[in-house]
Amino acid sequence: MPGYAPSEAARRSGFSLDTLRYYEKIGLLSGVGRTSGGRRVFTDEDLSWLVLFRCLRDTGMPIAEMCRYAELAREGDHTAGERRALLQRHAERVEEQMRLLQRQYDHLREKIRFYDRLPD
Amino acid sequence: MPGYAPSEAARRSGFSLDTLRYYEKIGLLSGVGRTSGGRRVFTDEDLSWLVLFRCLRDTGMPIAEMCRYAELAREGDHTAGERRALLQRHAERVEEQMRLLQRQYDHLREKIRFYDRLPD
DNA sequence: GCTTGACCTGGAGCGCGCTCCAGGTTGAAA
DNA sequence: TTTCAACCTGGAGCGCGCTCCAGGTCAAGC
C-alpha cells in the first residue's frame, strides 16, 4: 500500500487540493487515512475513486448524484444493482448530451463556413 | 416582419422569459423593439440571434464571449474576420470537449460492463 | 534548534448563469 | 367596462462547485 501525499493525489487525479478536501468534507470521499500528525494519506483505492469521480464530473453528473453512488457503494454488495442502474441512466443522459453537442457543433461549423464564403 | 411576443420568442428559442430579459439587460441581445405600451416585440432577426446563442451556450461558450461576438457584429462588416476567428477557436475547444466526453463515456460504459459481469 | 514549505481546520466568498420577486402597467377578450 | 393573464422594471437571491483565507501545525533539510 503506497499511500500518496495530498499534492501527489491532486496531481494524479487532476483535482485541486481544495477540491479533494471539499469532496471529503461533503462525504463524497470517505475514510481517507491520516498520518499521526493529521495529514491525509491517499491510497490507490482513494485514487481509483477519484478517477471515477473525474469521469462522472466530466460527463456532467451533479455532485449530489455522485454522493448517492458513493453512499450505495458503502452500503455493500447488495446495492450493486442500484448502482448499475444509476450509471446506466447517467450513460443515457450522456448519449443525449453527445448528440446535442454534435448537432450544435455542426451548426457552428456551418456558421463558420458562412464566413468562409464571404468576399475578402 | 411578423414580430413575436415574449412568450412566443421564449417558446421558439427555448430560453425562458427571464433569460431573454437578462440577455437584453447585459447587452447580449440589443435593439429589441417595443410596442407603444413598452412590451417587447421580437423580430425574425432577433430569433436567429437567439438560435445562435443557443448553439453557442449548448457548446459551452461563456456569455462574456458571446457578448464579445455580438459587439463585433454590431461594429459592422469589417469585423467579420475577427468573428470568424472567434468561432473557429470555439469550434476547436468544442472538438476537444467532444473527445473528452467520448473518452469518459467509454470509461463509464466499461464500468457498467463491470457490473454486468458480476454474479446475480 | 530553526527555517520553510506543505499541510491542517472552519468558514467565508466567489463566478456563473440565471431565476425570482414586488409592485405596477397593458391590452385583448367577455 | 371590467377583468385578468401577460407583460414591464429594478434589484435581490439562488444553486452549483468550488476557491480562498486566516491562523495555526507538521516535518524534512540545514
Image (cartoon, coloured by chain):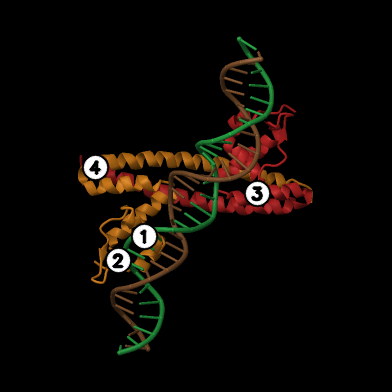
Chain colours: A red, B orange, C brown, D green
Q: Disc 1 designates what residue?
A: B20
Give amino acid for label 2. Arg
Closer-to-camera residue (C13/C29): C13
The image quadrant that residue C11 belongs to is top right
Does label 2 lie on the same chain as label 3? no
User: Residue D18: horizontal and vertical position, in percent?
Assistant: 54, 41
Residue A56, can we see it? Answer: yes
Q: Is residue B3 above or below residue A112?
A: below
Do callouts 2 and 1 mark residues in contact (Cβ within 8 Å)?
A: yes
- Say which label, 2 or 1, has the lower sequence index: 1
Labelled pair 4, 1 in contact (Cβ < 8 Å): no
Sequence-first tag of 4 and 1: 1
Residue at disc 1, secondary structure = helix
Q: Kindly identify which residue carries mark 2.
A: B40
Q: Position of residue B3 (x, y in %)?
A: 28, 67
Counting residues from the start of the chain, the first of labels 4 and 2 encountered is 2
Q: Secondary structure at mark 2?
A: strand
Q: Which residue is mark 4?
A: B79
Residue type at tag 1:
Leu
Contact? badges 3 and 4 (CB < 8 Å) = no
In whole angstroms, how far apart are the C-alphas of marks 3 and 4? 47 Å
Q: Quadrant of the N terminus of chain A?
A: top right
